[in-house]
Image: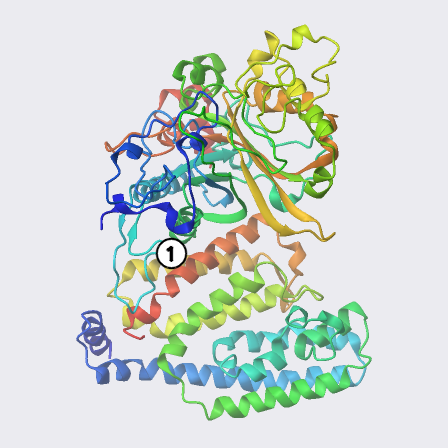
Amino acid sequence: MRMFALTAVAGLLAATGSQAAETLDLVGPVSEYKLFVSEQTDLLVEDTEAFVAAVNSGDVEKAKALFAPTRQHYEMIEPIAELFSDLDVAIDSRADDYEKAEADPDFPGFHRIEYGLWEHNSTEGLTPVADQLLANVQDLQGRIESLPFPPEVVVGGAAVLMEEVAATKISGEEDRYSHTDLWDFKGNFDGSQKIVELVKPLIADQDPAFVRQVDANFAVIDTTLAKYEEGEGYVTYDKLTEQDRVKLAAAVNALAEDLSTLRGKLGLD
Amino acid sequence: MTNDHLRTSRRGLFLGAAALATAPRLVFASTEAETRHAADAPIEDAARLSDRIQPYGPHQAGITTPRPANGMIASFHVLADNPADLERLFRRLTDRIIVLTKGGPVPELDPKLPPSDSGILGPVLTPDALTVTVGLGASLFEDRPWLQPAKPRALVRMAQFRNDALIADLCHGDLVIQLCANTQDTVIHALRDIVKSIPDQLVLKWAQAGNVPVISPPPGAPPESARNLLGFRDGSANPDSADASLMDTVVWVGPANDEPDWATGGSYMAVRIIRNNVERWDRTPLLEQERIFGRTKITGAPLDHPHGTEAMAPDFAADPHGKVTPLDSHIRMANPRTPASKANLILRRPFNYVNGVLKNGQLDQGLLFICWQADIEKGFITVQRRLDGEPLEEYIKPVGGGYFFALPGFAEGGDDFLGRTLIAALSPTSQDSSQSGLSTSQAQN
């Protein structure tokens, strides 16, 4: 398998590799990734059921406790989940996506519930939002099951997740009411690293310096995040020191640059 | 078509040679203007995309270099845990500076990869008089025990002055980059290139772009200073930046400055983002505006020579009670022109900025003040302290900026790079370090 992969990649880099070899080469990683996404989606549905049940029963504390770990599954599979933009908006949009922000009746999903739980310390009026969230998450599960995974989306997803962090997470604006951003970080990083691990055998021998650099930056992130672990998850985002925020930002920016070449390195458009 | 045929006029920018000067006596000695081809379209500008300013020399470019129409200050957090990291950063910056200021074709990559360049200048980079000037903030040294002993003596974190309303997100930084070029596009391109090239060691903290108005002087007219957004000429009393020996005293760190050896040839930089309350200013009577500055608005002439030129020196001694030039006017407080105040000369090289609209619905415009001096305490800090309480404060509000130390320059070739003397001073084998105990602190790290 290793020898086969190498030959294929060498061919790709010379831009003379056959399409068949190219596709075949990524079949393994892509189907393994599909399995990973499917597992995470199942967990997302399962956890959302519990989260929604807590909201609907008026248990504010329980709902708060379940908010971040539930979202983490979504953050992990974001490159696939956001292929369905209607659902992505319904599940994960933020107040600033709406003209009247939090007061906008159209503001839905996780962050609408987060707003109620943390800003008003209440589940009042959240039941329809929560029920809709669950329905959307179940819909997502069904759509992902029947989705063929295009290799360029899977491979490109590693960089997409870094762009997510760089653009909306590093500022602490994603989970602005609960400040559970570090959970989302972790989800995005793990989701990205999963893709890198799956395709790494295809480039490890060809481009060891690249792999070393990517691994080193993931290691910086792991070490930095580890300092903020608490219980099953993480402390709130405001506990992150400026120095560590900068360290994370640099590693994320470097990974976003490096991983933006991953598709091309594998011969994908 | 060669680069020589490209003109900034495609963007409607007309830059007279005189406008390039920061001071009346500073004439941009461009021979470019005379070497236009006969078939070229007639244009008024002197600036060209092919203008090239060498980045090499004992001092960095962009300090005494005649100011082009556009500039930007970008401030960064630095990731460097040891001297080797810092050297790597300096070498990477040097590489980009050489490439960007030289121009030339952009490397073509496999189209399946992201392009190496943003492409906003097209496939061939034009130097466009670009200068890239790098300064270091106090935090770079203070946050790193191995770097602390090498900190320039006078480098401090900018402290709040009386009229300041500093916004934390617009202040300070480990490292600052000043970008200047004829066109805004070249400045933006350079910033994007640097951000993309060094993502793991530079994290952008804040940036402010600016420009100065371009003029079209009649033939033979003396150079004039560019106007700020209050409509006054800014820089009239600057020391002559073409006078090398004067610059050695005013701008460049030398033996007289009691600085670490590595800092020789560098310069202190004060950056201030100063909001102008332009609506209110525009509703202020002309005579009051002129009393506040101490100059006439149209010509920039001092009030005691109202029909003269901005190049004329006011005679404050002849006006001890401030009957002609008020004692609290800006130019009189900033530079009282006494024998003692000569020690406080600074070289100003600011840009104007326009940022849109504030929450109150007023225009967010002002001055990206930049000045250079061999000693920041004797220079900007002393001058600004004198200005505390000036009537102009009613119309201006400093909101950001910082103090930085611009590294000495670097030579072409010979493995030289920006910051080499600092890195050498950190080496345990160098004489400097054994004297300053750097080898000890390094061993601990």
Name above or below for residue A60 compared with residue A242: below
Q: Would residue B416 be visible to someone looking at this image?
A: no
Q: Is residue B6 left or right of residue B273?
A: left
Nearer to the camera, A239 or A151: A151
Question: Measured from the top left, where is residue B375 in percent x and y?
Answer: 53, 20
In percent of width and height, residue B444 lies at 47, 34
Instruction: Examine the rendered structure and indicate whether residue B130 appears above or below residue B423.
Output: below
Residue B121 in picture, x, y percent from top left: 35, 53
Q: Residue at x 47, y 25 (%)?
A: B267
Vertical placement of B255 versus A76: above or below?
Answer: above
Residue A4 appears at what percent x and percent y?
21, 78
Q: Residue A128 falls in which quadrant of the image?
A: bottom right
Q: How is the image coloured?
A: rainbow
- Residue drawn at x 38%, y 71% is A197
> Is residue A63 in view from this perspective?
yes
Q: In the rendered image of this protein, does residue A153 appear above or below residue B408?
A: below
Mark 1, Cα crowd under 10 Å, few <14 / some 14-19 / many 20+, is: few
| Nearer-the-camera pick, A108 or A205 | A108
Residue hosting label 1: B120
- Chain for numbered disc 1: B
Q: Residue drawn at (51%, 57%), measured in percent from left and top?
A: A223
Q: Total marks drawn?
A: 1
**Residue A138 vs residue B33, the one in the foreground:** B33
Say left or right for B140 vs A212.
Answer: right
Q: Amino acid at mark 1?
A: Ile
SS of the residue at dot 1?
Answer: loop
